[in-house]
Image: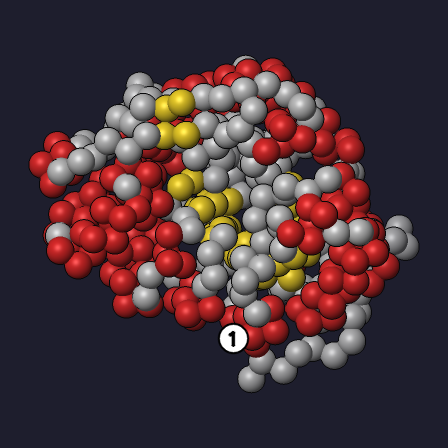
Amino acid sequence: MPRHDLRQVLPERKKTIMMEGSIELTPRERVMEAIEHREPDLVPVAFLRSTYDATRLKLDVQKYLLDPKTKLNAQIELHKRFPDCAFIPSIYPDFGMVAEPSALGAEVRLYSDQPPKALSFVRSLEDIDALEVPDPYRDGLMPKVLEAYKYMIENSPKEYYVDPPFIMGPLCVASEIRGLSEVFSDMFKNPASLHRLLKVCTKTAIEYIRALEEISGGSDFVFLADDIAGLVSPRFAEEFFFNYMKKIYDSFSGKIRVYHNDAKTMHLLEQIADVGVQLFNFSFQNDLKQTKERIGRRVCLWGNVEPIGIFRSGKPEEIEEICRQKIEIAAPGGGFVLSTGAAVYGPDQSVDAVINAAKKYGRYPIGKLIDNE
């Protein structure tokens, strides 16, 4: 049984809250309400957590990654610094984007001032044929992820949720270990071999999630991150991504299906909804109004303030105004979580500006529901 099961706890807690004359929810509870397309007390604010958290706190990134205690303390520090927003994942065993590639055989380079990097190594079609699904308890960095996950579950204060890490999607992992240009070339020239590679990456993800579930006893989310699908046509995305993505999700029924993509995905919106994504963290390049109109009744939208430009260098009042506009477009009727369209790169004052905008402009009810018919 998971330490936290908010989907079971939240309905009863809401009854108690309402009986006491207040409907104020926690940031995590607001997110869960939005995923169910209900209107919480405020528009939820949740930021995608990443290894950049370590640089925000001026930590040595390599030590942050390899030392579970340092990692746990850093993540708790950010929860305390920003108590009015959620983080997704919340407390989690962060190893960046290298756990899956490392388990498949990639060399990993660790740095003191930036996220780790996996080096591509699948040079030929014969290399693809030689790949095997790794053992998450033995291969690459996966054992360290499992060890850190166990440590965090056992040592995190009870008021914090401990989530599994986001899982790199099969197309993203394939691009990490084979190279992006080679994968694009394989779509045209060697589709059978690419499918073989994607099958291995898909089975790797499933075995990895199973090992994480074994440690936790169950978690709220299956969180896939894969930007590469946004760079290809709907036909190629269906053949080389969504079919495999669905296999991962379907292997863990009952979990909330979360998907992150930094790339523009306007051409893939209906496919994202059709695969059953429930919470979608999407790029600032997407038109929010169109995204809401096309899939907003089926998918909870999570975004999409520009994460590098205005968020990094804009004035708080400028960021608040952008957030006000996004709340006005996407928040009515629920199904919206205010955030950046990627991990958080800007200063603390920018994070505060997003949170303040939700407090100023995001109290429900928020006007008339946008007509999505």
Is residue 22 visible in the rendered structure shown here? Answer: yes
* Picture colour scheme: secondary structure
Residue 158 appears anywhere in the view: no
Identify the residue at image location x=46%, y=56%: 263
Callout count:
1
Give left or right: position of 144 versus 368: left
Q: Position of residue 63 (x, y in %)?
A: 55, 16
Percent of width and height locating residue 326:
70, 65
**Above or below — where is 157 with respect to 129?**
above
At numbered mark 1, what does the secondary structure look like: helix, strand or loop?
A: helix
The amino acid pointed to by label 1 is Arg
**Crowd band around label 1 with a 10 angstrom C-alpha radius: few (<14), some (14–19), many (20+):** some
Q: Quadrant of the C terminus?
A: bottom right
Position of 295 compared to 74: left or right?
A: left
Residue annotated with mark 1: 294
Closer-to-camera residue (133/107): 107
Q: Position of residue 44 (x, y in %)?
A: 71, 54
Give the residue displayed 54% in from the left and 62% down from the top.
285
Residue 86 vs residue 3, the one in the foreground: 86
The location of residue 123, given as percent across then percent down, is: 18, 36
The residue under the point 14% across, 34% down is 127
